[in-house]
Image (spheres, coloured by chain):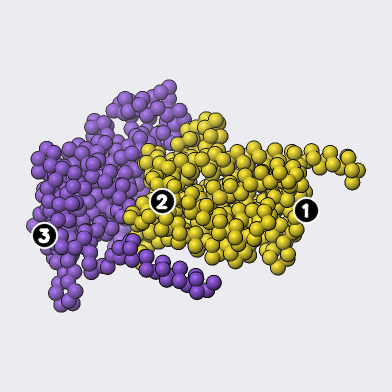
C-alpha cells in the first residue's frame, strides 16, 4: 500500500467543485458548438445534457472505485493487478494526462497564433506557458487548487458576456422544433463528440487522496459537472440563436467569434482581451494535468516528483511543437477525444466491475 | 537556484524583442472605412478612408482617402499600402461600402476576405452606394469630422427608427442561412450630406433590387419589433396625419396543410398621434377612425412589399427560415419552389394610446 499524503498537503472537500469544473472547461468551450452542430444540427443542445448526465454517472462510478480503494489510481491498480500489469495501466493513465495537457496547450497556442500574433513560433509560446506552469506546479497540489479556483472565478465572465450576443441574436426559435433536426442516433453521435468538453474529471483518480474526508467531496464533484453542463448549454443556446447553421459550420471558434460583437465603452475589440484572460483557464488545466502525471510517475518509480515534472515538461514541449498547422491540431483534438472517450466510458466501468469482483473473491478466500 | 532562474527570466526579456512587433498608435495608419468602386468587369477600385489626426492640438483633423485598382480586395490592400507612409491596419473599420455596380456583380469575394480576417469586428456596417464611393468618402462633411464616422452614426441611429437593423454579422447570418436573403442600406451623397435612400435587396451575394425609404419602414415593421419611427398617412378626407410608433411587435405563424404552407403575420402597434392637421382628436370616434385607417393602409403597403419579394423570389424577411423553425420535417427545396405562390396574410392592429400634450 502506497502512503497517503499528509494533512497539511490536503484541501477541503468543497474545492473538488473547482478542481472538477476547471479541468473540464478548457479550450474546448471556445469552439465546441460547431462540432456538435455537425452531428445533430440545432438539436445538439440535448446532447450536451445527455453527455453531461452520463459524466455524472461515470463520476459516481469513479467515486465508488476510489472510496473502496481509498487511494489514487496507481495504488488501486497495484492492489488489483499487481506490480507489473497495474504499473502498465497506470502508465497509460499518465500518458493520457500528458496527451490532454498537450492538446490544451497546443490548441490555445493556435488560437493565439491565428487571432493575435500570426508570426509567433509555437516553441516560443510553449516555453513561456510551460515555464509558467512549472512555477505553479512545483508549489504542490494546494497551489494548483488555488489556480483552479481562480480559473473558475474568471470563467464566470463567460456568463456575463452572453448578454451582448443575446442582444444581437437573430432568432431565439432556431432550436425549434425540438427534435425536428436530428434522429436519436445523431444525438448519441453528438454526445460522443461533446464528451471532449467534459474530459478532465478523471484526474480525480490522482488527486482523490489529497482531499480531506474525500467521501464528502462527491456532492461537490457532481456540482462541478452540473456547472459545466450549465455553461456549455448557455454558450451553445446563445450561439445557436446567434448563428445560422452554415455560418456556424464555417466558424472555427464560435464562442470567440461571439465575443466580436461585445461592445464595451473601454475596449473596442473584446475578443483580444478574452483570449488573454483565457490563459488563466488554460493554465489551470495544464498545471493540474502536469501535476497528475508527475505524481503518478512518482508513485510508480522512486524518483522525486520535481524531477519527474521537469522530464514530463520536456516531453510535453517536444510533443507540442510537432503540430504545425490547423489540420494537425484538429486531428490532435479528435485523437484526444477518441482516447478520452474510450478511457472514461469503457475503461472506468470495466475497472469498477473488476474491482467489485476481485474484492468479492478476496473476501471469500480470506473470509475478512 | 535563484540566480539560475532570474538569469533565465532575463534571457526571456531579451527574446521578446524578436517576436511580435509593438504597434504604437502614432506609427500606424488606421483604416476606418473601406469602399469598392466599379472599374471594369474584372477590376475594382478599392478606397480606404484614413482619418489623419495631427499631433498638434490647434490643427483640425483631416478626412483623407487613398485608392487603388486591382482584381482582388487583398491585392488592392497591397496597392493601398504602397501609397501610405505608415502601415495600414483595419482593426478600427466601421463601414464597408460597395458601389451599386460592384454589388450587382456580387460581393462574396470581399465578404469572404472580411470574414476571414480576425481584426474585423462583426458589428461594422455594410452599405450599397448609389453613385461614386470615392466621392462620398473623400468629402469633408461639416456635420462630422470623418466621413466614416458620419456614415456609421447615420446608419446606427436610422436603424433604430427607419430601416431594418443590419450589420456585418446580420449579413452573414442571412447570407449563409437557408430560407433567407441578405440586405444592406442604400446611401447616396447629395451635396454636403449623405442620405439613406432605402434598402438594397440581395439574392445570394448579388444586389437585385431596391426599395424606397418608406418601404424600408414597412419592412422594418415586418421584420422586427421596435420602439420608434413615424408613419404618415392620408385620411379619406384628404388630411394628413402622422402616427409615431411607441412599440410594435410582430408575430409569424406558419402553418402547413397537406404540403400547402400558409403564412400569417400579425403586427401590433402601440402609437401616438404626432401631427394631425385641423383634426380635433377628442371628437368621439376620430381616434378609432385614425387607428383603422392607419392599420388598413399599413396592411396594404405590407402586402405590396411581400408580393414584391415573392415576385423577385427573394426572402429578406427570412420566411423560409421561420417556417423551418415552426414546421416539422421541413423541406427547403420544396418551400423555395412554392415560395411565389404561398398565401401571406397580414393583420395589423394599431392602438393609439395618446395624442401628445394637446387634444
Residue depth check, mark 2 versus mark 1: number of the one nearer the observer: 1
**Residue wearing tag 3:** B139
> Which hue is chain B drawn in?
purple
Bin the neighbour count of mark 2 within 10 Å (Cα to Cα): few under 14, some 14-19, many 20 and up. Answer: many
Badge number at residue A1: 1
- Judge whether B329 appears above or below A29 on screen: above
Front residue (pair A279, B21): B21
On the image, the x and y values in percent for residue A172 come to 44, 45
Q: Is residue B113 visible?
A: yes
**Residue wearing tag 2:** A110
Task: Tell which subunit mark 3 falls on.
Answer: B
Rendered image quadrant of residue A302 = bottom right
Residue depth check, mark 3 versus mark 2: number of the one nearer the observer: 2
On the image, the x and y values in percent for residue B336 come to 32, 28
**Alpha carbon separation for disc pair 1 and 3:** 83 Å
Bin the neighbour count of mark 3 within 10 Å (Cα to Cα): few under 14, some 14-19, many 20 and up. Answer: some
Amino acid at each position: 500500500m502506497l502512503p497517503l499524503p499528509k494533512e497539511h498537503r490536503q484541501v477541503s472537500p468543497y474545492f473538488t467543485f473547482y478542481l472538477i469544473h476547471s479541468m473540464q472547461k478548457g479550450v474546448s468551450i471556445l469552439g465546441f458548438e460547431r462540432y456538435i452542430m455537425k452531428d445533430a444540427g440545432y438539436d445538439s443542445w440535448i446532447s450536451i445534457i445527455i453527455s453531461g448526465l452520463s459524466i455524472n454517472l461515470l463520476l459516481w462510478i469513479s467515486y465508488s472505485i476510489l472510496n473502496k480503494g481509498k487511494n489514487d489510481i496507481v495504488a488501486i491498480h497495484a492492489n488489483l493487478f499487481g506490480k507489473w500489469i497495474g504499473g502498465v495501466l497506470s502508465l497509460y493513465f499518465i500518458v493520457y494526462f500528458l496527451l490532454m495537457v498537450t492538446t490544451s496547450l497546443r490548441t490555445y497556442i493556435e488560437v493565439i497564433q491565428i487571432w493575435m500574433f500570426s508570426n509567433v513560433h509555437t516553441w516560443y509560446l510553449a516555453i513561456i506557458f510551460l515555464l509558467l506552469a512549472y512555477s505553479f506546479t512545483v508549489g504542490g497540489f494546494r497551489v494548483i487548487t488555488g489556480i483552479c479556483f481562480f480559473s473558475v472565478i474568471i470563467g464566470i465572465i463567460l456568463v456575463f458576456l452572453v448578454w451582448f450576443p443575446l442582444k444581437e441574436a437573430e432568432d431565439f426559435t432556431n432550436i425549434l422544433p425540438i427534435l425536428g433536426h436530428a434522429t436519436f442516433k445523431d444525438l448519441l453521435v453528438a454526445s460522443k463528440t461533446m464528451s471532449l468538453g467534459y474530459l478532465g474529471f478523471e484526474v480525480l483518480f490522482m488527486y482523490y487522496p489529497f482531499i480531506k474526508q474525500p467521501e464528502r467531496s462527491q456532492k461537490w464533484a457532481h456540482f462541478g459537472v452540473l456547472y459545466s453542463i450549465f455553461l456549455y448549454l448557455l454558450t451553445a443556446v446563445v450561439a445557436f440563436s446567434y448563428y445560422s447553421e452554415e455560418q456556424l459550420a464555417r466558424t472555427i471558434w464560435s464562442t470567440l467569434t461571439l465575443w466580436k460583437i461585445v461592445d464595451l465603452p473601454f475596449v473596442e475589440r473584446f475578443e483580444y482581451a478574452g483570449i488573454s484572460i483565457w490563459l488563466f483557464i488554460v493554465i489551470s488545466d495544464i498545471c493540474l494535468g502536469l501535476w497528475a502525471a508527475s505524481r503518478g510517475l512518482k508513485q510508480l518509480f522512486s524518483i522525486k516528483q520535481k524531477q519527474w515534472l521537469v522530464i514530463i515538461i520536456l516531453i510535453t514541449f517536444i510533443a507540442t511543437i510537432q503540430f504545425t498547422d490547423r489540420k494537425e491540431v484538429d486531428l490532435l483534438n479528435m485523437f484526444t477525444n477518441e482516447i478520452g472517450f474510450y478511457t472514461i466510458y469503457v475503461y472506468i466501468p470495466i475497472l469498477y466491475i473488476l474491482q467489485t469482483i476481485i474484492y468479492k473473491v478476496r473476501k471469500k478466500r480470506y473470509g475478512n | 537556484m535563484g540566480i539560475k532562474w532570474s538569469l533565465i527570466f532575463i534571457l526571456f526579456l531579451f527574446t521578446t524583442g524578436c517576436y511580435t512587433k509593438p504597434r504604437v498608435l502614432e506609427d500606424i495608419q488606421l483604416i476606418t472605412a473601406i469602399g469598392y468602386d466599379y472599374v471594369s468587369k474584372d477590376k475594382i477600385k478599392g478606397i480606404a478612408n484614413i482619418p489623419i489626426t495631427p499631433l498638434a492640438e490647434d490643427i483640425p483633423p483631416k478626412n483623407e482617402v487613398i485608392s487603388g485598382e486591382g482584381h482582388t480586395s487583398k491585392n488592392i490592400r497591397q496597392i493601398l499600402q504602397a501609397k501610405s507612409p505608415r502601415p495600414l491596419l483595419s482593426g478600427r473599420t466601421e463601414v464597408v461600402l460597395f458601389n451599386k455596380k460592384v454589388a450587382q456583380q456580387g460581393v462574396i469575394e470581399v465578404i469572404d476576405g472580411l470574414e476571414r480576417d480576425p481584426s474585423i469586428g462583426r458589428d461594422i456596417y455594410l452599405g450599397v452606394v448609389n453613385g461614386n464611393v470615392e466621392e462620398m468618402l473623400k468629402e469633408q462633411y461639416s456635420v462630422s469630422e470623418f466621413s466614416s464616422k458620419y456614415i456609421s452614426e447615420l446608419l446606427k441611429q436610422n436603424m433604430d427608427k427607419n430601416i431594418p437593423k443590419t450589420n456585418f454579422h446580420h449579413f452573414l447570418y442571412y447570407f449563409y442561412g437557408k430560407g433567407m436573403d441578405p440586405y444592406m442600406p442604400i446611401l447616396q451623397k447629395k451635396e454636403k450630406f449623405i442620405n439613406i435612400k432605402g434598402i438594397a435587396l440581395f439574392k445570394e451575394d448579388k444586389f437585385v433590387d431596391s426599395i424606397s425609404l418608406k418601404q424600408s419602414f414597412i419592412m422594418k415593421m415586418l421584420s422586427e419589433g421596435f420602439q420608434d419611427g413615424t408613419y404618415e398617412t392620408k385620411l379619406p378626407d384628404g388630411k394628413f396625419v402622422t402616427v409615431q410608433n411607441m412599440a410594435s411587435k410582430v408575430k409569424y405563424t406558419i402553418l402547413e396543410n397537406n404540403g400547402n404552407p400558409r403564412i400569417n403575420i400579425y403586427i401590433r402597434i402601440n402609437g401616438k398621434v404626432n401631427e394631425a392637421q385641423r383634426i380635433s382628436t377628442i371628437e368621439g370616434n376620430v381616434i378609432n377612425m385614425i387607428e383603422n385607417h392607419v392599420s388598413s393602409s399599413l396592411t396594404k403597403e405590407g402586402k405590396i412589399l411581400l408580393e414584391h419579394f415573392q415576385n423577385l423570389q427573394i426572402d429578406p424577411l427570412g420566411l423560409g427560415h421561420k417556417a423551418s423553425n415552426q414546421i416539422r420535417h421541413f423541406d427547403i427545396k420544396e418551400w423555395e419552389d412554392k415560395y411565389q405562390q404561398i398565401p401571406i396574410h397580414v393583420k395589423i392592429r394599431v392602438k393609439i394610446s395618446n395624442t401628445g400634450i394637446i387634444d
